[in-house]
Image: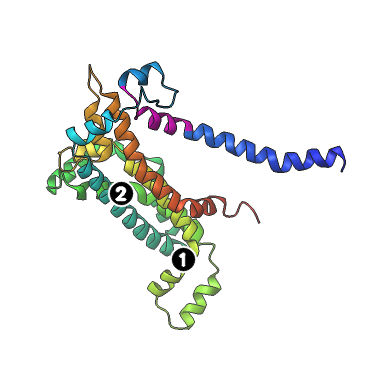
């Protein structure tokens, strides 16, 4: 085998995997750093931040503090409830709106799609004062319902924008055949939804992470002890003069677990949704 062929095979097979591995290590480095330091003593965190815990530096003090000083089981339950219900409502309402915009042609259809997509460009936090007044008038302050409603409004523009593009690519002949067979519009919607499953998973991941990691709206709308989320609960270990870094890193480590699990569940469909149309 000639040297040129050997170099070509090496370039085509080894180099892409090495580059991918390098990017993966760079992306995971902050996560690994937080995790390994959560199992260290306070002194070791500052003295040897890049070293793995040893027998002399290993400590579970941070995790003990988290469970003793904070109701993290309640915080986890609140975050899971808010995240799961928000994602379900975003996907359901977004998919139905995207189906209507892609399937039915009516005057003002493009303007309606543009209006629904404006939320991607205009941050919802600009309306925090108005949202707080509205939530207060509805007696929803310090409730998980308020957070769910706000996050649904926040995630709908992206959901509609993405799903509309994918639903428009579904062959019209398939939908017309279903209508000829007597299928209702709801039945047709149910038939199309599995065909855009990669897009649904992509939207779920992209709206899940901002909801789980959000600090702003839990602090404004639901700061009560019974309605705190994980991200807000972790802030109690950060003080103006003294911070309990063992507890902070431990709480952040615990907060990452559900996100990583959900990401692994949706990862295959996420990659398919992002790369759809890139390779023909």
**Above or below 105: residue 208:** above
**Above or below 278: residue 221:** above
- How would you classify the magenta stretch by its main secondary structure? helix
Nearer to the camera, 59 or 110? 59
**Left or right placement of residue 230 versus residue 137 in this view:** right
Nearer to the camera, 208 or 246? 246
Q: 10 Å neighbourhood of mark 1: few (<14), some, or many (≥20)?
A: few
**Left or right placement of residue 194 versus residue 62 in this view:** right
Distance (Cα) linking label 1 and label 2: 22 Å
Residue 162 position in % (x across, y down) = 46, 53
Scheme of image coloration:
rainbow
Which residue was labeled with disc 2?
Answer: 83
Residue 186 position in % (x across, y down) = 38, 72
Residue 214 position in % (x across, y down) = 31, 38
Residue 68 position in % (x across, y down) = 18, 34
The extreme bottom residue here reads: 181
The extreme right residue here reads: 2
């Amino acid at each position: 085998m000639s040297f040129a062929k050997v170099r070509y095979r090496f370039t085509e097979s080894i180099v892409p995997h090495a580059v991918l591995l390098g990017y993966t290590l760079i992306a995971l480095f902050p996560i690994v750093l937080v995790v390994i330091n959560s199992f260290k003593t306070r002194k070791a965190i500052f003295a040897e931040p890049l070293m793995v815990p040893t027998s002399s530096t290993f400590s579970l003090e941070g995790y003990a503090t988290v469970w003793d000083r904070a109701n993290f089981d309640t915080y986890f339950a609140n975050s899971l409830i808010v995240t799961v219900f928000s994602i379900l409502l975003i996907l359901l309402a977004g998919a139905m709106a995207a189906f209507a915009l892609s399937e039915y042609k009516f005057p003002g259809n493009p303007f309606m799609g543009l209006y629904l997509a404006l939320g991607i460009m205009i941050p919802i936090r600009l309306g925090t004062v108005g949202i707080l007044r509205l939530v207060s008038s509805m007696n929803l302050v310090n409730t998980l319902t308020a957070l769910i409603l706000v996050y649904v409004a926040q995630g709908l523009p992206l959901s509609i924008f993405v799903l509309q593009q994918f639903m428009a690519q579904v062959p019209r002949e398939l939908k017309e055949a279903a209508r000829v067979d007597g299928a209702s519009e709801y039945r047709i919607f149910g038939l199309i939804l599995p065909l855009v499953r990669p897009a649904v998973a992509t939207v779920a991941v992209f709206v899940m992470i901002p909801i789980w990691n959000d600090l702003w709206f839990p602090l404004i709308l639901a700061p009560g002890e019974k309605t705190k989320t994980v991200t807000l609960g972790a802030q109690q270990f950060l003080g103006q003069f003294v911070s309990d870094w063992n507890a902070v890193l431990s709480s952040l480590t615990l907060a990452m677990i559900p996100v990583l699990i959900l990401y692994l569940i949706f990862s295959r469909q996420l990659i398919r949704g992002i790369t759809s149309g890139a390779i023909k």
